[in-house]
Image (tube, rainbow, N blue to C red):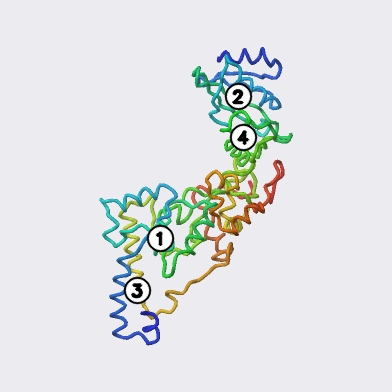
């Protein structure tokens, strides 16, 4: 309703005040979709458990169904075999949606610079917040979630793009191939390895 | 030294190669052409009674002259004895050996894994497909020494091929029927699986995209 009414008028005092209220509610009621593949998922569980208590930030409900989730949290490395799976889960989530890449492996491939691992999930789905660490402590993940809150609070209902679904062709690349090769250049120990050894 | 080795030599003679003890484990080398016959004998002879197949795996050494070793780890649950049987497969010959799935059903996925990682094909295996890598994977056999750690293709091409794979195609209709899921499948997915949409499995020994 908000989009159709407010989207027509230019931002003014009322819409910005309304944005503040609505974004406060949106940011504090996000439903995560945990995509735990490795040890980061253990830290994620610790974050959700009573000591760190993710529910303080409105993430009470773990949505194990992508259609009722806002935030995809990829906790752990992503093998190539799971790339089409996470792509499909992401596309099943309704806009507006966000992605947190938790840990070094999800963000960059981490120590797994090998034939089986996606070198950063941003080559498969768009990522909003990268949380560094191997694995990140629960405080780290909570800080990432607070950064995401900050991002959500900067959005405005007057933005017509906010709820627009953007579809990718099945099996198509999200970013240009040249950029993927550049992003996943060898680093660390991998610099002495060759692709055609 | 496990006394089984002497019994094996009496029963099979020349087809039993050298035997050694390493870390308390007896390792016996056998002729790759007689693997199934020898393992059947070890399983069905009452005095031996190796009724449990612990693992099937393979080893490739860094030295290019050394052959691939196929390893069967056996255990007798009744006698508490262990035996490691190895078969050497020369690299210039086709990497083929008889499947032991008729002896132990446990060998099914283990042999699929050896096939997936090393490219050794098992005759009369009921369902020899890749198991860890996806079905349309054509870059080769990852645990072979000539396989580069990062794969043969560029990262972008790897991502593109991975995204083009169908997640459902990892399962066969037989596997889905075990889970009693085949009747709940969406019509298009069922049709894809029946058509056998799972890409071509590269033939052993042939290097794709090399």
Residue under the point 61% across and 39% down = B112
Asked whether the residues under marks 2 and 4 belong to the same chain, the reply is: yes
Q: Secondary structure at mark 2?
A: strand
If you read the primary sequence from the N terminus, does the residue marked by circle 3 or circle 1 appear first? 1
**In the image, which disc is placed on residue B85?**
2
Q: Is residue B13 left or right of residue A4?
A: right
Residue under the point 70% across and 34% down = B96
- The quadrant in which residue A94 appears is bottom left
Residue indicated by mark 1: A100
Residue under the point 63% across and 56% down = B191
Residue at mark 1: chain: A
Which residue is at the front of the view, B100 or A12? B100
- Rendered position, A96 above or below A16: above
Dot in front, 4 or 1: 1
Image quarter (top left, top right, bottom left or bottom right) of the N terminus of chain A: bottom left
Residue A99 on image: x %, y %:
42, 62
Distance between mark 3 and mark 1 Cα atoms: 17 Å
Residue at mark 3: chain: A
Q: Secondary structure at mark 3?
A: loop
**In the image, which disc is placed on residue B206?**
none
Which residue is at the front of the view, B179 or A133? B179
Residue indicated by mark 3: A154
Residue indicated by mark 4: B62
Q: Secondary structure at mark 1?
A: strand
- For the residues labelled 3 and 1, say whether their Cβ atoms are less than 8 Å apart: no
Which residue is at the front of the view, B183 or B197? B183
- For the residues labelled 4 and 1, say whether their Cβ atoms are less than 8 Å apart: no
Dot in front, 2 or 3: 2
């Amino acid at each position: 309703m908000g989009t159709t009414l407010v989207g027509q008028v230019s931002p003014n005092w009322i819409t910005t005040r309304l944005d503040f209220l609505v974004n406060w509610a949106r940011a504090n009621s996000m439903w995560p979709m945990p995509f735990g593949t490795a040890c980061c998922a253990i830290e994620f569980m610790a974050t959700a458990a009573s000591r760190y208590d993710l529910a303080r930030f409105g993430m009470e409900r773990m949505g194990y169904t992508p259609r009722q989730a806002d935030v995809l949290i990829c906790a752990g490395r992503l093998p190539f075999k799971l790339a089409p799976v996470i792509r499909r889960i992401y596309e099943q989530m309704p806009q507006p949606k966000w992605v947190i890449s938790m840990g070094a492996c999800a963000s960059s491939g981490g120590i797994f610079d090998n034939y089986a691992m996606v070198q950063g999930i941003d080559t498969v789905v768009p990522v909003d917040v990268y949380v560094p660490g191997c694995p990140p402590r629960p405080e780290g993940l909570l800080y990432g979630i607070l950064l995401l809150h900050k991002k959500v609070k900067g959005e405005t209902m007057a933005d017509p793009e906010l709820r627009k679904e953007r579809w990718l062709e099945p099996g198509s690349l999200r970013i240009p191939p040249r950029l993927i090769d550049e992003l996943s250049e060898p680093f660390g120990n991998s610099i002495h390895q060759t692709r055609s050894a | 030294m496990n006394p089984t080795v002497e019994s094996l030599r009496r029963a099979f003679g020349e087809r039993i190669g050298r035997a050694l003890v390493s870390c308390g484990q007896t390792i016996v080398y056998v002729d790759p052409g007689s693997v199934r016959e020898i393992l059947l004998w070890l399983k069905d002879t009452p005095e031996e009674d190796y009724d449990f197949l612990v693992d099937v795996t393979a080893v490739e050494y860094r030295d290019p002259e050394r052959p691939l070793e196929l390893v069967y780890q056996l255990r007798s649950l009744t006698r508490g004895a262990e035996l490691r049987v190895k078969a050497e497969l020369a690299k210039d010959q086709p990497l083929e050996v008889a499947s032991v799935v008729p002896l132990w059903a446990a060998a099914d996925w283990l042999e699929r894994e050896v096939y997936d990682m090393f490219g050794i094909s098992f005759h009369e295996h009921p369902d020899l497909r890749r198991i860890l890598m996806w079905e349309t994977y054509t870059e080769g056999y990852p645990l072979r020494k000539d396989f580069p750690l990062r794969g043969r293709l560029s990262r972008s091409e790897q991502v593109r091929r991975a995204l083009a794979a169908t997640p459902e195609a990892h399962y066969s209709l037989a596997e889905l029927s075990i889970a009693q899921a085949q009747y709940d499948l969406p019509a298009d997915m069922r049709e894809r699986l029946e058509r056998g949409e799972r890409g071509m499995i590269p033939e052993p020994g042939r290097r794709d995209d090399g």
